[in-house]
Image (cartoon, rainbow, N blue to C red):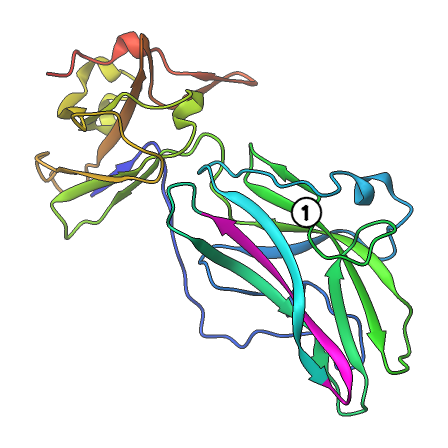
């Protein structure tokens, strides 16, 4: 069995129905659908938060996520319901390398049998336009959005605003490393700020037996100084896993170090209450 010290991701798919808010009630987090895996929505400040300064911050902001993608929230006409306009709010990221747009998720107005329409749009003080996000938490990869929920056609609830969090963006210090037991490759996706450094000149990947930890002086080079030229954000790099299969009852680890100029880092450690970087001098020379 092998594991990565840098990042472990477990994805579970549940064949359960997705609940939504009731017809004739305000749209909320249950009504968001996401096209990208790992994203979710939660209400941070409940309705009505229009007087809360947190809901008013960041007007017209266009934050950039930790993969260098520009985040925007769009509110556009979708059609009509009983002669009433319907809209859709979409979260879109723009690929900085020219790869176009990628839809993260959307919430769509609901046409009710009663003839009313439950609606939602990004909330902007004193504006009817829908192009705004509140703010982006780079450390944890969370987008905060003020969402206005209201109704057309005569409804039992008043217009209100809530603060929601869209979770699932790449976190600041992630060097995403994957390992598949049936595969002979180890892969990493290059983040925008690898281990907090401005960029990566190259990576070095090591393996070792977990029984030797935290003594990284015993780590064995797996692949050194790759790629040949500095990688771009979002590049997926693979190296051949030449580490031996450990005996039954033992586990190997795989750790990747990043180099930028004279700086070298390979993850963090907790010393008492303080989180700090591991000592790069402990890793053997990779060659």
Question: Residue drawn at (81%, 91%), measured in percent from left and top?
Answer: 114
The residue to which callout 1 is attached is: 133
Residue 280 visible? The answer is yes
Residue 265, quarter of picture: top left
Residue 88 as seen in the image, left or right of residue 129: left
Q: Is residue 199 above or below residue 13?
A: above
Q: Quick check: is 48 in the magenta stretch?
A: no
Q: Quick check: is 85 in the magenta stretch?
A: yes
Q: Nearer the viewer, residue 280 or 112?
A: 112
Instruction: Where is residue 139? Give x, y as percent.
Output: 55, 32
| Region rendered in magenta | 81-94
Question: Residue drawn at (40%, 24%), measured in percent from left and top?
Answer: 195
Question: Residue drawn at (66%, 55%), measured in percent from left and top?
Answer: 42
Q: Residues within 10 Å of mark 1 (few under 14, many from 20)?
A: many
Q: Is residue 214 above or below residue 97?
A: above
Instruction: Where is residue 1? Give x, y as percent.
Output: 20, 43
Q: Is residue 102 above or below residue 71?
A: below
């Amino acid at each position: 069995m092998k594991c990565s010290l840098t990042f472990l991701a477990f994805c579970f798919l549940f064949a359960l129905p997705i609940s939504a808010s009731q017809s004739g009630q305000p749209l909320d987090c249950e009504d968001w659908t996401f096209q990208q895996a790992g994203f979710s929505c939660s209400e941070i400040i409940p309705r009505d938060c229009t007087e809360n300064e947190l809901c008013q911050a960041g007007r017209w902001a266009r934050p950039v996520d930790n993969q260098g993608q520009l985040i925007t929230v769009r509110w556009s006409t979708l059609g009509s319901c009983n002669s009433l306009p319907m809209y859709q709010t979409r979260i879109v990221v723009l690929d900085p390398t020219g790869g176009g747009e990628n839809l993260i998720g959307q919430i769509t107005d609901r046409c009710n049998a009663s003839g009313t329409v439950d609606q939602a749009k990004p909330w902007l003080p004193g504006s009817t336009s829908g192009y705004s996000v509140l703010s982006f938490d780079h450390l944890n990869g969370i987008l905060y959005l003020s969402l206005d929920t209201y109704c057309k056609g005569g409804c039992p609830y008043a217009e209100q605003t809530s603060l929601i969090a869209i979770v699932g963006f790449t976190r600041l210090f992630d060097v995403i490393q994957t390992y598949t037991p049936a595969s002979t490759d180890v892969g990493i996706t290059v983040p925008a700020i690898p281990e907090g450094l401005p960029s990566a000149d190259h990576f070095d990947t090591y393996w070792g037996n977990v029984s030797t930890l935290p003594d990284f002086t015993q780590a064995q080079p797996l692949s050194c100084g790759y790629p040949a030229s500095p990688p771009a954000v979002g590049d997926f790099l693979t190296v051949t896993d030449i580490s031996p299969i450990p005996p039954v009852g033992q586990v190997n680890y795989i750790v990747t170090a990043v180099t930028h100029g004279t700086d070298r880092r390979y993850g963090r450690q907790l010393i008492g209450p303080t989180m700090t970087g591991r000592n790069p001098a402990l890793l053997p020379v990779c060659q």
